[in-house]
Image (tube, helix red, strand yellow):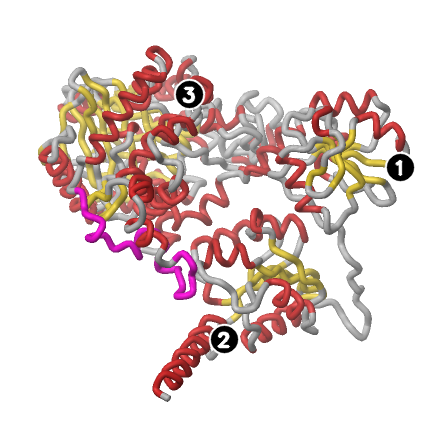
Amino acid sequence: MDVNRYVKDLPRGLISWYNFKKDTKALLITGRYPAFKVLFSVFEDVGIKAESVDISEIGTVDGGYDYIIVAAGLESTLEPKGLLAQIRKLLKGDGILFLATFNRLNIGQVVGDKDVTTGHVLDGLDNYKRIVPHRMKEMDGRCYTKLEIEEMLTTAGLETVTTFSLFPNLFRPQIMVKYGETPNERFDGRLQGIYNAPESVFLDKASIYDDFMKHGLLHTMADGYLFVCRQIDSSEAISNEITDIKSIQEITVQTGRKPEAAQATIVYTDKVVKKNMYPEGLKSLEETDENARYLNDRGVPVITGNFTENGYETPFIKGQILTDYLRDTLIKNGQNDFIITLTTIKNIIEHSSNNLSYDEVDWTKFDPYWEKRKPDDPELYKWRDLAHGTEEDKAAIGVILERGYLDLAPINCFRTETGPLYFDQEFYIRQFPANAIFLRTIEVVYAGWNEGEKLMPLQQVLDHFNLSTHAEMFRLQIRKHLLDFINDNELQAYYGKVQPHHGTLTNNRFRMDYPQAEYEKLFTDIFKDADGKKLYIFGSGDYATKFVKRFRDQYVIAGIIDNNSAKWGKDLEGIRIYEPAHLLTEKTGLKVFICIKFYDEVLTQLKEMGITHIGIFNPWLTYPKPPKHIPTATADAPPKKYHIGYVAGVFDMFHVGHLNLLRRAKEQCDYLIVGIVTDEQILKYKKTRPVIPFIQRFAIVQGCRYVDEAVTIPIEDAGSEYAYNTYQFDVQFSGSDYENDPNWLATREYLRQRGSDLIFFPYTEEVSSTMLKEQLRENTETAKNIENTD
């Protein structure tokens, strides 16, 4: 299944959770949003007779349908009442309508997302008052509120059996909650914000779902709705099917996963049913059942169930989610009880599977990215050496489980009268550290919980349980295996289209505080008037350090200013720190960059001092580099396809493959910038050392006739996003060995959204730096063998 298929299938979550009855007849009605045509494949999977028709051709079908599915249909017509009246006539007497709609008052409108029908912000909130009649006709539809839709349904002779509030987006439903009910779990950690237009968003809605839930606003401002309806005057008795639907409280669908792992969880008032969302997913349900029974045999309480015609059925458990219980424990009972409770959880995890002796563990594969490590990686045998090191070394690694159940986490556990009771243990990883699972437990509890950090800092908890030493590796292990299981790596290009970059959120939010001209001066074009002035930094903390490292090669920094008198006279990164009064000695001809997270007081202070040239630095943002002179096109040298091009690489043991790449890139652009990866970054990400050190690699590339400018790729901002925002290139070139990589496909999508592009050149298969290294290594070993023979 390719990446495009994963994305195409995301809307299936609207109905793939439902058990459509055999020997029935279904109709899918589509409108202006072609993404929902994929819903027809759900009927194909189930094997029932079905048809699909566009709204404009609804009069061509005969009727008598047991099920009718309409997704964003009301938003695809100027006559929604008429559409509903036609649908009613097409339903059988006991037929069921599934009507999926956007919500005019959805939470996305509050955080800056654009209305799906108009393409502008706030239109839904003010009920389209700014849309003139002829523009409304051109739109062919608009969004409505739940109340407005219910009124239309009643007018059409349809009654609502039940309504589900849908999150986080109609195009990718993940959680559907019966209207008015409190969700079984908090949304933080479960949902990511999905948007129609991420470029205009100024606040991530995922961060405020739970607050809206707490204050009773969640359903009114849901991202969408799924109405389940029947005819008002139906002579048919209410069927068991309708009764069954009415008792559903919540639905969770795992959209985006591989078909064999995608499940839906339907929570009823008296039971919970897990259902495979694709035919090939039945095996995953069987594995979930086997895992539950295995863990129970190990003394770990896990909810078990039985297979029925509806799926895998377990009893409904009324209990507090362990995440909330642990938080309440710290709030109400204090640190000691919190640590005692966590210790109990730690013991459960450590006894959830057989504990392996260190001699049974393949330590070369302890790093989840072990396949990337090269023979010359200095940390190739790090974990083997630590496992056979001191008792202190072993204690920091902890217990290695034969089966590591990564979802033994508080979000998958109830706290009942008898203690923790886990659920949904879908998979395990062999030879896995118990400490990694326990670290996940703790960090899930602390995620987004500022109060907990005040009551007992996270670092204090990690130190108490000896988790700090290898916390980075434990996080890497959890992240790698979870991303593989939920298939998130394959969806990176999709996320690039529907989620805002952190810098976008920051920029948009700042923009709301100031008039446009002042905003650009303070936050966007911070170097615009820097030429010819003395440049100072205000602040001497982490932001200041990042500013110096990023810009000291481009600008001369005259000094650092700080209000803390204890720092006056000292240096930061070799630059002297002064008191604020020092600026008054150079009141004219200077510019000050505020490098402090909470900058308001300093901004006021500088303005009161009479300083007018001020910029506010944010390390999350990227600032265009001052352009060097780029030759203009002439009759003898006409412009090429692209103006500025960019290439990034290691360029170790510079060879003909590198030369071909740079030559072909320069053939297509007027000005070629080449970014070179540092030694530190190579060791961190490629797990090897370069043969040629950075300074020499930089000089070699800089001396190439095809290269107009060589630049250093910063290790903290090594991605193409930073490079694009810095150099504003028209195209990036890369070797074709990355052509199908999900992360590079996401990069291409990011660039194309901004008018740039990513071009892949055929890889020179005859030679590579890796091949040359191997050849060099073999030659060295051969020479040593000859010496030993002599």
Q: Nearer the viewer, residue 55 or 548?
A: 548
Q: Nearer the viewer, residue 708 or 494?
A: 708
Residue occupying image coordinates x 32% and y 17%? 336
Residue occupying image coordinates x 43% and y 29%? 459
Sequence order check, earlier mark of 1 and 2: 1
- Determine the CA span between mark 1 and mark 2: 53 Å
Chain part drawn in magenta: 355-379
Residue occupying image coordinates x 72% and y 32%? 594
Residue ranking furthest to the bottom: 790
Q: Please state, as top left, top right, bottom left or bottom right, where the N terminus lies in the image.
A: bottom left
Residue 237 in sight from this viewpoint: yes
Pointer 2 residue = 764
Q: Quadrant of residue 614?
A: top right
Residue 309 in sight from this viewpoint: no
Q: Secondary structure at mark 1?
A: loop
Of labels 3 and 1, the one closer to you: 3
Q: Is residue 249 above or below residue 518?
A: above
Pointer 3 residue = 456
- Type of residue at label 3? Met
Of labels 1 and 2, the one closer to you: 1
In screen coordinates, is 730 left or right of 107? right
In screen coordinates, is 709 left or right of 363? right
- Determine the CA span between mark 2 and mark 3: 56 Å
